[in-house]
Image: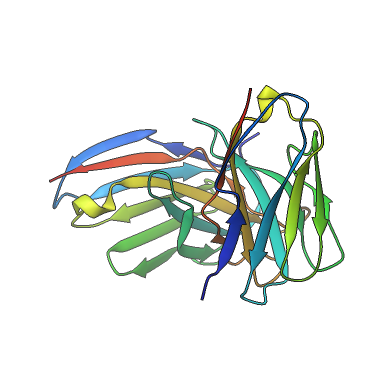
Amino acid sequence: NAGVTQTPKFQVLKTGQSMTLQCAQDMNHNSMYWYRQDPGMGLRLIYYSASEGTTDKGEVPNGYNVSRLNKREFSLRLESAAPSQTSVYFCASSEGPVPNGYTFGSGTRLTVV
Amino acid sequence: SQQGEEDPQALSIQEGENATMNCSYKTSINNLQWYRQNSGRGLVHLILIRSNEREKHSGRLRVTLDTSKKSSSLLITASRAADTASYFCATGPDTGRRALTFGSGTRLQVQP
């Protein structure tokens, strides 16, 4: 049982490049989330999807887009990467829109140079 | 802005001692949760306490919640070197955005 799988684990981008971070869960969870983690700042919510077919902005959505491709997959896209987007990105999922406990992926460490 | 603020930011104790971490938050909540993160890994859910509960236990973990003070504490009893990690509180709102808001975390070091 894989839980939440994120790819890639590491990525280096040049400023202005684009990329998509992939996330898939195999627990039949309805809700999925993208967070970023910066040193000393905990996790900040970028976007979330309370159910298949819906997405909503979080605390720090600027510079990102998301797609809830189906119930299993929730991708995060950086259209034009900036050094300020250097961070560790975590995907998480939960059973329902009232978050009773997340299952996290292992993260993507992104560096933008 | 961070909903939860944790105190202390870092804590170093000896194996066998108890570790206490505190979390304060700002808005009304549906529940409060604690997570653990080992270095370089994702977060792992430890325990959830609902807004109508005051105390909850799970193994060596004890969580308290005081909604009048908007605060929670996590107690780890008889700590082990393997408990070395960062611990985060997260609040689930009772209205509005349907996602957890995380604090900045407490780094716990348990010396063998």
* Residue A25 left/right relative to A40: right
* Residue B65 left/right relative to B59: right
* Residue B22 left/right relative to B16: right
Q: Where in the figure is residue A70, as x and y percent of width and height?
A: 80, 69
Location of the C terminus of chain A by quadrant is top right
Residue at 61 percent of width and 58 percent of height: A92
Q: Is residue A49 above or below residue B37?
A: below
Residue at 16 percent of width and 49 percent of height: B17
Does residue A102 show up?
no
Quadrant in the picture for residue B47: bottom left
Q: How many tags in the picture?
A: 0
Residue at 51 percent of width and 58 percent of height: B33
In the depicted view, which residue is nearer to us: B47 or A6? A6
Does residue B56 show up?
yes
Q: Where in the figure is residue B5, as x and y percent of width and height?
A: 51, 37
Q: Is the image coloured rainbow, by chain, by secondary structure, or in one colour? A: rainbow
Q: Residue furthest right?
A: A53
Residue at 55 percent of width and 69 percent of height: A3
Q: Where in the figure is residue B97, as x and y percent of width and height?
A: 76, 53
Q: Where in the figure is residue B82, as x and y percent of width and height?
A: 24, 54
